[in-house]
Amino acid sequence: MRDGIIPPGSTIGILGGGQLGRMTAMAAARLGYRTLVYSPEFDAISGQVAGHVQGAYEDDDTLARFAAQVDVITYEFENVPEATVVACEKHKPVRPGVRPIHFAQHRLREKEFFRKSGLGTADYQSIACEADLGKATALPGILKTCTEGYDGKGQVRVATKAELAAAWDRLGRRECILEALVDFDCEVSAIVARGLGGQTRCFPIGLNDHRDGILRTTTVPSGLPKATLAEAERLGVQLARSLELVGLVALEMFVTKDGGVLANEMAPRPHNSGHWTIDACATSQFEQLVRAICGLPLGAVDLLAPSRMENLIGEEANDWLRYVSDPTARLHRYGKAKARPGRKMGHVTYVNPT
Ligand code: AMP
């Protein structure tokens, strides 16, 4: 396609079959794109709103058949194997590409990349072998596995070297990172789009409330001082530029008691803390991803109304009648069959919340 632009009528391929791909497919359809999802599950929830190819991420033949049917490929989770992205790149452009997941998949690489890109972080150190335990100084802290942790999984709070040793044992003596505990005032996130030509646009900064490591609510506007918001946006944009990505990146940050902003974690894809944009922003994060990877101009990110997004976790989604009866609530259910504890089943956005 000329200049890398993928026009409406084309087909977007998405690696991963969850709610982020599902909401991307819904936004893509509005602009006249088709979507084909690739995932190992036979009943991927995005398959309810898009075409679906069932295949293993290691199955190069099925990946090639999938790639032949699409014009551009993206991913909806950062733990897609690097080799899968490389295999897809042989056939079609993959945006945002392999570089962002290389860093996002591994907490130590991620933190090193933040520092190299000029983003401040909590103090941290690598805990990869027995000898590292004795040298630990980032205490009290949180011991996190370098790979495969999400929503607070694979994390243990530790106050002493003895607790650290026990926690490392409990995490299977795997490669870990010990991060000093940040006594933060609040948590925020920046979601930044970067287009084919390198232009960037950051959504209004959301104020995030986590419980047990899982995001519960995002509120916009956050009510934070202008200087803090500007700093959070600056870090997000700086990250998108350093990654040279074409697509979206979400950066979760801590706002410290003295007003400083530290980078915690990134995700090179739409993010749970950006779901409010569907109902309360000129362009949703999902449409913005489609615009970025298809080489369209990035959309406006003006806040249309104050909003608060609440995740519906496990059985909470069974209360759907209450939400659809509330005129200030916009209900989003992800089409998941089974409500397990801790599973994100949907969300509700309150527009102009009281
Ligand atoms: P993460 O998976 O790294 O995003 O961590 C999940 C949540 O745990 C964060 O949103 C924070 O609420 C908390 N957390 C993680 N790392 C730290 C830290 N170094 N200091 C204080 N709280 C943290």
Image (cartoon, rainbow, N blue to C red):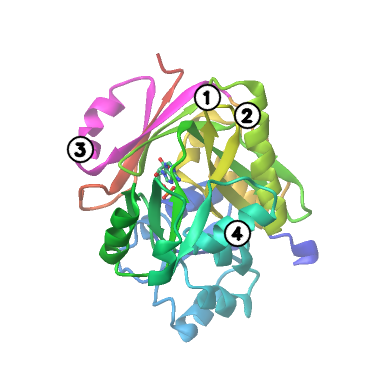
Inter-mark Cα distance, 1 to 4: 28 Å
Closest to the observer, 210 or 317: 210
Looking at marks 3 and 1 on the same chain, the residue that comes earlier in the sequence is marked by 1
> In the rendered structure, are the residues bearing label 2 and label 1 in contact, judged by CB atoms less than 8 Å apart?
yes
Q: Is residue 199 above or below residue 284?
A: below
Image spot of residue 158 (x, y percent): 33, 49
Disc 3 crowd rating (10 Å Cα; few below 14, some 14-19, many 20+) is some
Please name the residue shown 62% across and 75% down the image: 89
> In the rendered structure, are the residues bearing label 1 and label 4 in contact, judged by CB atoms less than 8 Å apart?
no
Inter-mark Cα distance, 4 to 2: 24 Å
Looking at marks 2 and 3 on the same chain, the residue that comes earlier in the sequence is marked by 2
> Does 315 appear in magenta?
yes
Residue type for callout 4: Glu
The residue wearing badge 3 is 318
**Magenta residues (range):** 304-331
Looking at marks 1 and 4 on the same chain, the residue that comes earlier in the sequence is marked by 4
Residue 229: numbered disc: 2
